[in-house]
Image: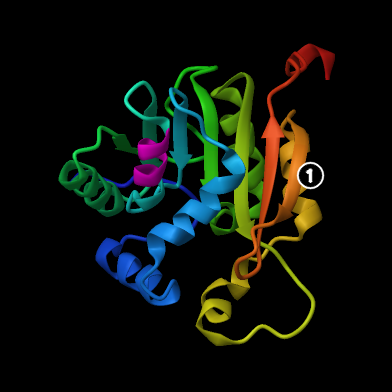
Amino acid sequence: MGDAPHTPGMVIHHAAGYDFLVRVLTLGRERAFRERLLAPARLESGESVLDVGCGTGSLALVARRIVGPRGEVHGVDPSPEMIARASDKARKARLVIQFKTGVAESLNYPDGRFDVVLSTVMLHHLPKTIRQQAVREMRRVLKPNGRLVAVDFVRSPGPHRGLRAHFHRHGRIDPRDLEALIKNAGLDVVESAPVGKWDLQYVIGRHARPEPRRNDV
């Protein structure tokens, strides 16, 4: 299956257990949940999409169906077990998706490769010092006028109880910090709002201006 690439972030390797947990948390409606996560991206037919931290590939499968035969979807995750399960899902669904192991903070893709980059419920697994580096990498692989869609758990007032709170209490992000990550990477924040499920927030950043050269900073 290959060695996992090194990353200081949290890596989930138990692919079958992960899928089981998601089915439990979504009450068996994982596809509807993934569609809700994808809705802010407003994917269009023919677009090229990269799913960073793709896990077992469920979101990438939904995205592939949306972009259609003229589009393309790639997925990257640091866990070989996750990539193997994602590839198996795509094969069974008869969908062409390019999955490979890799880390968010060092994406093995050329500059300006994708129309859309997705980061869903992934950034909270990275140390704060690595999150900005990861988002800059996502910006780098975006085409001019491309968009980054980041979705993650955010802090909200009031008590947090139950299974979901237990699993994600460690990594909640301040909504302002999520927007700041996007802005500091050189993207224009064009939209930010709750997903409408649990404590998830989405932020859309658009690649609308050139990044300053190092000697200009």
Indicate the position of residue 215 as horizontal and vertical percent values. Answer: 79, 12
Rendered image quadrant of residue 64: top left
Residue 158 in which image quadrant:
bottom right
Observer-nearest of 57 and 193: 193
**Can see residue 176?**
yes
Residue at left offset 58%, top offset 40%: 41
Total label count? 1
Up/down of 98 relative to 22, above or below:
above
Q: Is residue 183 left or right of residue 9?
A: right
**Element type at mark 1:** helix
Secondary structure character of the magenta stretch overall: helix
Q: Residue at x 32, y 60 (%)?
A: 13
Q: Which residue is mark 1?
A: 180
**Viewer-proximal residue among 109 and 91:** 91
The stretch drawn in magenta includes residue 98: no
Magenta span: 60-66
The correct choice, above or below, for 73 with respect to 11 in the image is above
**119 relative position to 93: left or right:** right
Q: Position of residue 47 (x, y in %)?
A: 47, 25
Q: Residues within 10 Å of mark 1 (few under 14, many from 20)?
A: some
- The location of residue 95, given as percent across then percent down, is 24, 37
Instruction: Residue 75: tell me if it is visible.
Output: no
Quarter of the rendering containing residue 15:
bottom left
Q: The C terminus is located in which quarter?
A: top right
Q: How far from the left and from the top, in percent, is residue 21?
A: 37, 73
Q: How is the image coloured?
A: rainbow
Q: Disc 1 residue type?
A: Ala
Q: Is residue 96 left or right of residue 210?
A: left
In front of the other: 122 or 146: 146
Camera-nearest residue between 75 and 62: 62
Q: Does residue 93 appear left or right of residue 137 in this picture?
A: left
